[in-house]
């Protein structure tokens, strides 16, 4: 395993242990609302602090973009992109679908990614050009090619309700052409599940970089494809993402583009 990936794994496991301890006593956790339908807890902050401590100890000069503390670290060509607890709303409710997501970008290109599900002790890792793994076992996207046989993951645009009409058009068409759709509530895990073949594709509007940086690398290193709604690689900027097996990705992208509105141009 690459030394940088080792640090990311160490950081993810440390955050995971904080999350697991806190999950034993959810009633005592303070919850704050950042905006409508968007919550943060002291657990998010403690997990993020633990991740940053591990990274700073190993790479003090690297920049960091984290969900709770924002963009820090100046001009380094290396930037860590961190979501300490993707799926906070699930966590608050004791719904066991959430994860730690950590990625490292070099000059804007994601090179390493870790997604850790502490409730199942599942560790997804990827390094650009070296493949994707689940608990040290190589993973690949599914071999499905037909949309009507596929299971598709998605997420509602709960922070950008002005996109709901466009999204519902996409949802309606995808739902009518697939074997099923799932909305578990943690985009990082949704992407990890596409990477290991549990789902065959994924799409969502209005994601943040920390929701998807590690997951997109996971999918592409597992043999899948990913793009924004224009078919380009600007997803970290636009927040709009389609991913999947090569054949399913192409069909999903077509549906998304059919239902795109002028307010959703990329």
Image (cartoon, rainbow, N blue to C red):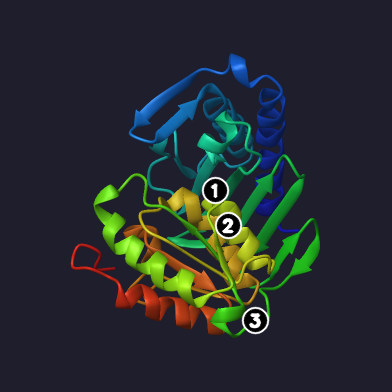
Q: Residue furthest front?
A: 176
Work out whether residue 244 or residue 144 is closer to the camera in this orientation and state it. Answer: 144
Q: Give the residue drawn at x 35%, y 71%.
A: 229
> Where is mark 3, residue-wise?
144
Q: Residue furthest left?
A: 262
The answer for how far apart the CA atoms under marks 2 and 1 are is: 6 Å
The answer to whether one can see residue 82 in this image is: yes
Q: Give the residue drawn at x 30%, y 72%.
A: 259
**Sequence order check: which comes first, mark 1 or mark 3?**
3
Q: Give the residue drawn at x 51%, y 47%.
A: 80
Vertical order, 253 against 71 (above or below): below
> Where is mark 1, residue-wise?
186
The answer to whether one can see residue 69 in this image is: no
Figure disc tally:
3
The answer for how far apart the CA atoms under marks 2 and 3 are is: 17 Å
| Disc 2 and disc 3 in contact, CB within 8 angstroms | no
């Amino acid at each position: 395993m690459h030394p940088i990936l080792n640090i990311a794994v160490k950081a993810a496991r440390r955050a995971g242990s904080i999350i697991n301890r806190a999950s034993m006593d959810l009633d005592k956790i303070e919850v704050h609302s950042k905006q409508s339908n968007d919550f943060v807890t002291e657990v998010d902050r403690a997990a993020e602090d633990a991740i940053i401590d591990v990274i700073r100890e190993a790479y003090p000069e690297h920049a960091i973009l984290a969900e709770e503390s924002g963009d820090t670290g100046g001009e380094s060509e290396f930037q860590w992109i961190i979501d300490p607890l993707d799926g906070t709303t699930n966590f608050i409710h004791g719904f066991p679908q959430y994860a730690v997501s950590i990625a490292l970008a070099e000059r804007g290109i994601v090179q390493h990614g870790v997604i850790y599900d502490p409730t199942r002790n599942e560790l997804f890792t990827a390094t650009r050009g070296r493949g994707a793994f689940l608990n040290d076992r190589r993973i690949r996207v599914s071999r499905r090619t037909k949309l009507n046989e596929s299971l598709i993951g998605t997420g509602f645009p709960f922070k950008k309700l002005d996109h709901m009409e466009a999204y519902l058009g996409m949802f309606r068409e995808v739902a009518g052409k697939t074997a099923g759709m799932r909305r578990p509530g943690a985009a990082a895990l949704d992407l990890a599940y596409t990477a290991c073949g549990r789902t065959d594709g994924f799409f969502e509007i209005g994601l943040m970089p920390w929701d998807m940086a590690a997951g997109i690398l996971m999918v592409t290193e597992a043999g899948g494809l990913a793009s924004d709604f224009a078919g380009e690689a600007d997803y970290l900027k636009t927040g709009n993402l389609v991913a999947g097996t090569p054949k399913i990705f192409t069909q999903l992208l077509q549906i998304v583009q059919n239902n795109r509105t002028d307010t959703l141009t990329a």
